[in-house]
């Protein structure tokens, strides 16, 4: 049977009203029904199209924004629940140090294919780097668990995120800066393969 | 990314002669290349960007042959308005075909411009050189440049295919890992997809799909929907029902109001459907894929091993659902779409909308990742039909996640039966393979059909079951059904089912994934029975030199010879050459089988001939390997009496970040060989290598995909 989101199937519709939102540090007023998902307001009313529609069900992460600093799907967040909170989208992170490090690193690793999942992943990764300057591979993977990628860019995304964390630590003179991307803690990877180091992978120049 | 193949386009939709493989024949140079006075090269290619980096690779080839800096080349998005008709971006053939055409065309443009200089200066063409578009003589004296030499009409000459392309040994741009052009904008969250289009006055359309594929719309009371202030139109044609509103969320709400007010007639359909047991022996069209007989072989056969392998249907499950924008202006409609083929879509739309194809313009705009025939073409029709009710206003339609899972064509369930005769040493003598399943091609134009979902609903006719692409372009059910190994007596057949409970079409790899899975699983078991290492056994039956090398490279990089099996670890190996003509691919998988199967590492070696962009290729290979791991471990479309029951990401789980294997890619360098298709090479070998590794870990063979804990437990129990 169809699985339409609850707000869309509600029998009684709240009358349109003026909803006040704070997005990317600025106040906005939008006239809509108060249960309208934030994602549509961001994309269509505020012209912030970097948050993408993937499922509308809070299941894929393509629409992730920061809500008071926490990575949150915006596709099933009613406008009334966003009102009074600080919303930051991928566009609003353009000047963020962590986001810039991530974007540089994602570019260097060409860490995307279609790129449809990328905005949501960057937002989630950015929140991670704020919370944990020195995340290991498993921590990064765990932080991105709610973000789906169908093209299989995962390996590059994980490496790029670790490397961005490393470059941020280096820029801030934090300990752990000497750790390079791709090192994987104490796991006994030597038993897996004769020559397992990333640098041996013949994937060539370009980074 | 991807790129499954098209079937034949039927006579009702005649195709303008497209450039043949690698020659650009029948086109004009100016259809492909425009040199701009300000020093830019506009490259018009018929291929579309599906997230696979194809546009970047083709621009590299153009820069190489023209001798201009790579940054000057600007690929122009495919459109029916301009550029060559290259049919579909499908079948892993983009670099093989388009790359050849771009190479030919650009070599010819260069020669033409040099001949202009030669006529003017009297210097023979052979003594002129080009540096980033500037022409110099042998002494280095400037003799003009492309940007000032080109005159209107100069390139309006037919492609002859007679200018020799550059010697690969002198390549400087081709073979380099230049970064993708589109990525910077996407990383900034800039508008990049058809979903992000916001044309002036754009409205929002949504479609109310029937409750099941066999349901028909009896009545609908559209007054409650029309009473919503945002609603501009309700459209009903047959069982096609949709709405147009001036706000997106209001279109979504109005569609749900309409759904509540609609009465459908649903004939009694079957209860829960497991398509796998409903496959072998059903009415089918049989095709002889390959037959090689050796009368003396029977006498050498000491044992015949019979096995059968299956998979459940697979969903494309792109992260972004189908989307299109359509805009009617008088009797002309413009459509913005992430289709794999702007020209085939134009013909299908014209047929369904009953207008002349000249009245339909299709522009390509990227969508989310494309892994075959998904909803892109269908949603374009939805947008065109809805937009006709509001002439002069563009209408954007985005499918819901529910509709995307329920209505996009699935990759069909398959069963592959294998019977192998071996001699007394356990070596291969006879091989019989029967591949069963629904067809892999219901693209626009298949079997004389426009093939657009909404048009079937509007006409109240059942969707036509999918055909298979002809064997000449790789087949569908029979794709890769012929083992690559030395076998004296061979009998390979494909059986395409004539009826199916769910709409099917091309999904990355088509039948190759299952056929390779079956062949490579069978070979692995035969190696074990013969007491041979799976690598040695394959090497001794593989006649192709490049195949053996790619296997060796994968095995070496994985440390195959020094691998340490043991609880709960298993190692597996597999090889295939996609379609028998594309790239060679060998995979070693390492799995850990505890409560569920975990793939920790994949070593993937590929030989795709000349490599245009090594990092771009590696990116595709990694992505294909991870997607195939997800298919094998997790994925199955669940069917019930309403059609597809798995309609969200909980019902259709895919591999997530914590679960993905580390993918180690090795490219076998072959700069002097022609480039071979690469987009779909990994699916079959990854599927088989993972299953072989699981068999190695457990000592039990699981022949039915996906390898869920339940299936693994059942296999252990029955062993
Ligand atoms: S679109 Fe919001 S989680 Fe999928
Ligand atoms: S890059 Fe396409 S979905 Fe992640």
Image (cartoon, coloured by chain):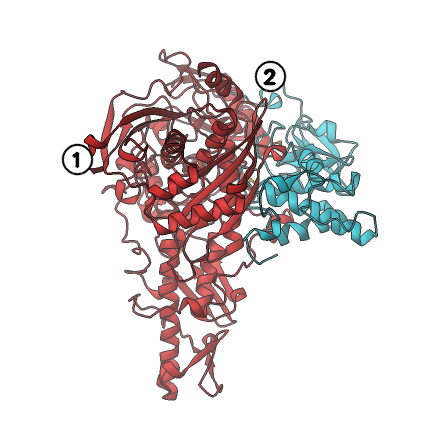
Chain colours: A cyan, B red
**Along the line of sight, the residue nearer the viewer: B216 or A100:** A100
Q: CA–CA distance between discs 1 and 2?
A: 75 Å
Name the mark on residue A11.
2
The picture quadrant where one finds residue B563 is top right
Image quadrant of ligand 1 equals top right
**Along the line of sight, the residue nearer the viewer: B642 or B701:** B701
**Along the line of sight, the residue nearer the viewer: B91 or B89:** B91
Residue neighbourhood size for the residue with mark 2, other residues' Cα within 10 Å, grouped as few (<14), some (14–19), many (≥20): few
Q: Residue at x 54, y 25 (%)?
A: B648
**Label 1 beta carbon less than 8 Å to ligand 2:** no
Q: Which chain does the numbered disc 2 sit on?
A: A
- Which SS class for mark 1? loop
Q: Residue at x 56, y 51 (%)?
A: A201
- Percent x, y of residue B546: 38, 51
Is residue B182 among the parts visible in the rendering? yes
B296 sits to left or right of B312: left
- Percent x, y of residue B684: 42, 37
Have a look at marks 1 and 2 and say if they share a chain: no
Looking at this rendering, what residue extends furthest in the left direction? Answer: B295
Nearer to us of marks 1 and 2 is: 1
- Which SS class for mark 2? loop
The residue beneath circle 1 is: B296
**B684 is higher (above) or lower (below) than B242:** below
Quadrant of the rendering where the C terminus of chain B is positioned: top left
Q: Residue at x 58, y 27 (%)?
A: B568
The picture quadrant where one finds residue B569 is top right
Is residue B93 among the parts visible in the rendering? no
**B691 is higher (above) or lower (below) than B105:** above
Name the mark on residue B711.
none
**Along the line of sight, the residue nearer the viewer: B551 or A67:** B551
Q: Residue at x 36, y 88 (%)?
A: B122
- Percent x, y of residue B373: 40, 37
């Amino acid at each position: 049977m169809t699985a339409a989101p609850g707000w869309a199937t509600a029998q009684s519709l709240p009358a349109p009203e003026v909803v006040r939102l704070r997005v990317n540090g600025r106040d906005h007023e939008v006239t809509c029904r108060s249960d309208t998902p934030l994602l549509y307001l961001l994309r269509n009313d505020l012209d912030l199209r970097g948050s993408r529609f993937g499922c509308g069900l809070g299941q894929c992460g393509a629409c992730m924004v920061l809500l008071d600093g926490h990575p949150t799907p915006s596709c099933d967040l009613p406008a009334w629940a966003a009102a009074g909170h600080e919303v930051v989208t991928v566009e609003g992170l353009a000047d963020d140090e962590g986001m810039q490090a991530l974007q540089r690193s994602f570019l260097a690793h060409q860490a995307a294919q279609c790129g449809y999942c990328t905005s949501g992943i960057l937002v989630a990764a950015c929140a991670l780097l704020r919370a944990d300057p020195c995340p290991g591979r498993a921590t990064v993977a765990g932080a991105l668990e709610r973000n789906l990628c169908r093209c299989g860019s995962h390996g590059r995304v994980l490496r790029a995120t670790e490397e961005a964390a490393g470059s941020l630590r280096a820029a801030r003179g934090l300990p752990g800066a000497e750790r390079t991307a791709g090192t994987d803690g104490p796991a006994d990877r030597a038993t897996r393969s004769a020559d397992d180091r990333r640098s041996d992978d013949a994937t060539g120049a370009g980074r | 990314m991807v790129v499954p193949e098209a079937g034949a386009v039927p006579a009702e939709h005649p195709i303008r002669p497209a450039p043949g493989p690698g020659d650009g024949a029948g086109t004009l140079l100016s259809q492909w290349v425009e040199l701009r006075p300000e020093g830019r090269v506009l490259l018009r290619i018929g291929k579309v960007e599906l997230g696979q980096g194809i546009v970047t690779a083709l621009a590299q080839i153009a820069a190489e042959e023209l001798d201009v800096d790579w940054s000057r080349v600007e690929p122009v998005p495919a459109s029916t308005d301009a550029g060559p008709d290259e049919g579909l971006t499908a079948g892993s053939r983009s670099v093989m075909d388009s790359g050849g055409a771009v190479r030919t065309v650009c070599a010819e443009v260069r020669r033409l411009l040099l001949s202009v200089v030669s006529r003017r200066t009297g210097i023979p063409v052979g003594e002129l050189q080009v540096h980033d578009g500037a022409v110099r003589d042998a002494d280095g004296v400037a003799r003009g440049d492309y940007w000032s030499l080109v005159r209107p009409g100069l390139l309006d000459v037919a492609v002859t295919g007679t200018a020799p392309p550059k010697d690969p040994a002198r390549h400087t741009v081709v073979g380099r890992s230049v970064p993708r052009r589109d990525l910077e904008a996407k990383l900034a969250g800039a508008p990049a997809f058809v979903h992000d289009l916001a044309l002036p006055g754009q409205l929002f359309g949504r479609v109310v799909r029937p409750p099941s594929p066999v349901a028909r719309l009896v009545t609908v009371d559209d007054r409650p929907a029309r009473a919503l202030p945002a609603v501009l139109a309700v459209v009903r044609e047959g069982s096609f029902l949709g709405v147009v509103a001036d706000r997106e969320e209001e279109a979504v709400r109005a569609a749900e109001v309409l759904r509540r007010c609609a009465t459908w007639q649903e004939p009694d359909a079957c209860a829960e459907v497991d398509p796998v047991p409903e496959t072998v022996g059903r009415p089918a069209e049989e095709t002889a894929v390959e037959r090689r007989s050796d009368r003396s072989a029977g006498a050498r056969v000491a044992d015949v091993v019979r096995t059968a392998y299956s998979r459940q249907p697979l969903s494309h499950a792109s992260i972004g659902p189908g989307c299109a924008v359509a805009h009617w202006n008088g009797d002309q409609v413009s459509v913005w779409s992430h289709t794999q083929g702007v020209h085939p879509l134009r013909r299908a739309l014209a047929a369904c909308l009953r207008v002349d194809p000249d009245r339909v313009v299709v522009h390509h705009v990227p969508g989310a990742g494309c892994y075959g025939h998904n909803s892109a073409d269908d949603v374009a029709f939805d947008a065109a039909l809805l937009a006709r009710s509001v002439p002069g206003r563009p209408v954007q339609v985005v499918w819901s996640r529910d509709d995307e899972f329920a209505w996009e064509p699935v990759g069909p369930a398959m069963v592959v039966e294998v019977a192998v005769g071996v001699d007394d040493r356990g070596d291969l003598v006879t091989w019989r393979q029967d591949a069963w399943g629904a067809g892999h091609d219901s693209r626009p134009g298949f079997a004389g059909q426009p093939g657009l979902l909404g048009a079937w609903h509007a006409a109240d006719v059942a969707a036509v079951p999918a055909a298979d692409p002809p064997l000449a372009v790789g087949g569908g059910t029979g794709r890769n059904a012929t083992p690559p190994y030395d076998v004296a007596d061979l009998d390979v057949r494909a059986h395409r089912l004539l009826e199916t409970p769910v709409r099917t079409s091309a999904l990355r790899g088509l039948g190759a994934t299952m056929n390779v899975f079956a062949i490579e699983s069978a070979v692995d078991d035969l190696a074990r029975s013969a007491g041979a290492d799976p690598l040695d056994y394959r090497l001794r039956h593989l006649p192709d030199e490049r195949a053996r090398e790619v296997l060796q490279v994968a095995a070496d990089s994985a440390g195959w010879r020094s691998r340490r099996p043991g609880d709960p670890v298993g190692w597996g190996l597999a090889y295939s050459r996609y379609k028998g003509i594309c790239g060679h691919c060998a995979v070693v998988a390492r799995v850990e089988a505890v409560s569920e199967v975990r793939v920790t590492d994949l070593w993937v070696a590929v030989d795709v001939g000349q490599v245009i962009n090594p990092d771009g290729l590696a990116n595709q290979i990694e992505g294909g390997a991870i997607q195939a791991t997800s298919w094998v471990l997790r994925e199955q479309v669940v069917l019930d009496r309403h059609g597809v029951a798995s309609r969200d990401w909980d019902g259709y789980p895919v591999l997530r970040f914590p679960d993905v294997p580390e993918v180690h890619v090795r490219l076998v360098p072959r700069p002097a060989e022609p480039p071979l298709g690469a987009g779909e090479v990994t699916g079959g070998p990854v599927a088989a290598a993972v299953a072989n590794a699981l068999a190695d870990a457990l000592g039990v063979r699981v022949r039915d995909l996906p390898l869920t804990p339940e299936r693994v437990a059942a296999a252990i129990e029955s062993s």
